[in-house]
Amino acid sequence: MTWYLTDSNGKHIVQVCGDDTCQVQALSNFIQDGLQNEEAVVVFAKPALRKNVISHLSALNFDVQALKDKGQIKFFDAEFMISSLLINEVIDRQAFYELVESQIEAIYSKCGKIRVFGGMVATLWNIGRYEAAMQLEDLWIGLTEKYDFSLLCSYSLGNFDPASYEETLQRIFNCHNYLTPVEVDDASENSGSVGESVMDVLTLAWNRAAQEVNKAKRNLHQNHSSGFLN
């Protein structure tokens, strides 16, 4: 299963995947949709994820090398990018412009239609650099306002203890506090398998956390509206 946060127009989506296999599938679908829509695709991902996605796309009969040669798809190493963006534990805005925005700008100018997978925020989050993750997320937001493109982020919870799901999800929500978590159907009774049981726990944790976030957003909106009325 995949759980989502999204903005009002669906241009920025965050996927929370139950495991690494699900993440590969979700990212491959995102890239496939872009290629079939004749969009350019830019991917910032860790080496293992990049390798698995390329293998998945090749199995779907995409000639990835040919797509790379004509510039329709570009892959960048998320870990290398982060090492270049982090200066004294802070994301450097000028480095972001030179290494990330300039790439988006050039591809956007050439192709007009692009979509981006920004795996760097999740990479920072995975290593506990939460402040840097939020700084980088703010820069991505600015970029989506400057250029019209779809942005996907994704997180895999495959290596996390189910007991920590709610805390983990809350940190993800904090990194994307302008997005709305989409609640899913309540976890159904499972047949007793470990995999289904873990998915049930994650679904329940997601809905509890999502309800709190959405309640806070509604209260903020109501208070804002009351201020205008007063």
Image (spheres, rainbow, N blue to C red):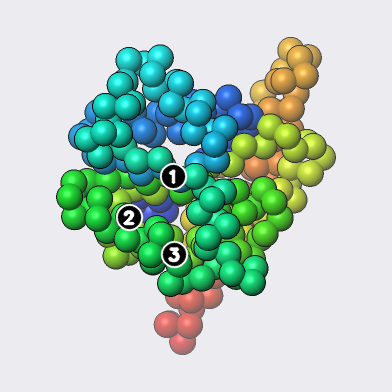
User: Is residue 129 shown to the viewer in this render?
Assistant: yes
164 to 193, vertically: above or below: below
- At 56% from the left and 48% from the top, the residue drawn is 79
What kind of residue is marked 1? Phe
**Answer yes or no: do the residues labelled 2 and 1 have beta carbons within 8 Å?**
yes
Label located before the other in sequence (2 or 1): 1
Most foreground residue, 72 or 190 = 72
Mark 1 / mark 3, whichever is N-terminal: 1
Query: Is 148 above or below relative to 5?
Result: below
> Viewer-proximal residue, 173 or 29?
29
Q: Amino acid at mark 2?
A: Gln
Q: Which residue in the structure is indicated by mark 3?
A: 96
Classify mark 1: helix, strand or loop. strand
The residue depicted at 64 percent of the width and 72 percent of the height is 88
- Using the image, tell me which numbered label, if any, was put on residue 103: 2
Q: CA distance from mark 2 to mark 1?
A: 10 Å
Counting labels gives 3
First in sequence, mark 2 or 3: give its number. 3
Q: Position of residue 142 (x, y in %)?
A: 39, 66
Q: Say whether marks 2 and 3 touch (CB < 8 Å).
A: no
Q: Residues within 10 Å of mark 1 (few under 14, many from 20)?
A: some
Residue at x 74% of width, y 50% of height: 167
Find disc 1 in the rendering and name its residue. Answer: 76
Q: Nearer the viewer, residue 114 or 150?
A: 114
Instruction: Determine whether, in the image, residue 136 is placed left or right of residue 107.
Output: right
Disc 2 to disc 3, C-alpha distance: 10 Å
In the rendered image, which quarter contains the N terminus?
Answer: top right
Task: Give the percent coordinates (x, y) of residue 198.
Answer: 74, 27
In which image quadrant can residue 106 be found? bottom left
Residue depicted at 31% across the width and 20% down the height: 62
Mark 3 secondary-structure assignment: helix
